Image (cartoon, rainbow, N blue to C red):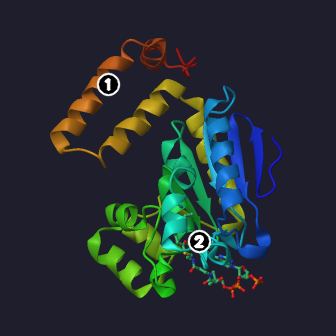
Amino acid sequence: MAYETIIVEVEDHVAVIRLNRPDALNALNTQLLSELADALREADVNEKVRCIILTGSSKAFAAGADIKEMSEKSFVDVFLADLFGNEATAAARVRKPVIAAVAGYALGGGCELAMMCDFIIAADNAKFGQPEINLGVVAGIGGTQRLTRAVGKSKSMDMHLTGRFMDAEEAERAGLVSRVVPAKSLMDEAQAAAGKIAEKSRLTAMAVKEAVNRSFETTLSEGTLFERRLFHAMFATDDQKEGMGAFLEKRAAQFRDE
Ligand code: CO8
């Protein structure tokens, strides 16, 4: 499909979706969010794709929702359109693993979009923030919820109330990102991580993702029961036999997603 605000490339079982509105630091407007939702859905059902990387430019992952587009809207406009409802949260509904590769600014909706991904690899020039308070609004696609779960109440309150930016080092210390890498090797590192994931059983990777995400939605006892039942269910797959068999035979596993 031809997109105007994103670039999609599929190679070696990895779909790379690049946000591409360079004149606006990849600000998330309606068109971009709609194209991104389509591309994510397509990658999710594409049999060739085993992992997705979502990225931006070296200067900005995304500097937030498009302020120009929304500044004149009324409550009735945004309520009736359910602004930042379904399309803006498409990344959170993808079943395959999604890595956010973040360089430069990830602000407001950009930070929220990165947090919808399964983990964030940050370039050393990355800057995260929820500066919506400076615009007279609160975060709109999960920032108050996901950032709080990622870094705890105190730092989340600090970020949302002061609107300050967090650099990559602080983001790693706080647990917002899984690793920080030199800016010039960001995509190589993200591709390497995606390549590792692509070697695994797709079934198991999707089950891992469901189990970890369940921890945000339920109690410890329900969550561990859910995990254990998934673990049990894996014994109905050929990939479990292959994985354990390959270990015992001291060879690399050849998973077939069965
Ligand atoms: N929306 C629209 N245009 C933007 C945005 C944005 N969020 N951010 C940057 N731009 C544009 C600028 O207007 C400018 O365009 P022009 O050249 O035509 O004037 C161009 O991008 C370059 O920006 P700057 O000249 O400002 O670049 P600087 O390097 O000086 O500064 C900053 C970079 C610090 C990132 C600065 O641009 C900035 O503060 N941007 C706004 C950040 C922000 O407040 N983000 C939060 C937006 S609100 C939000 O995300 C609400 C979330 C609700 C849900 C979202 C769902 C998707």
Secondary structure state at the residue bearing disc 2: loop
Question: Horizontal placement of 95 versus 192: left or right?
Answer: left
Instruction: Indicate the amino acid at tag 2.
Output: Gly
Quadrant of residue 27 in the image? bottom right
Mark 2 closeness class: few <14, some 14–19, many ≥20 residues within 10 Å = many
Instruction: Find the residue positioned furthest to the front.
Output: 76
Residue lying at 46% horizontally and 27% vertically, measured from the top left:
204
Q: CA–CA distance between discs 1 and 2? A: 38 Å
Q: Is residue 123 left or right of residue 227?
A: right
Residue 200 found in image quarter = top right
Instruction: Spot the residue most to the left.
Output: 221
Q: Quadrant of residue 15?
A: top right
Q: Position of residue 163 (x, y in %)?
A: 45, 84
Residue under the image location 50 percent in, 55 percent down = 85
| Element type where label 1 sits in the image | helix
In the image, the residue with mark 2 has its CB under 8 Å from the nearest atom of ligand 1 = yes
Residue 167: x %, y % from top left = 51, 78
Q: Is residue 57 left or right of residue 242?
A: right
Q: Nearer the viewer, mark 1 or mark 2?
A: 2
Q: Residues within 10 Å of mark 1 (few under 14, many from 20)?
A: some
- Earlier-in-chain disc, 1 versus 2: 2
Q: Position of residue 43 (x, y in %)?
A: 66, 37
Rendered position, 159 above or below 199:
below
- Give residue 64's mark: 2
- Looking at the image, in which quadrant does ligand 1 appear? bottom right
Residue 231, numbered label: 1
Ligand 1 under 8 Å from disc 1 Cβ: no
Residue 161 shows up from this direction: yes
Residue nearest the observer in this picture, 200 or 140: 140
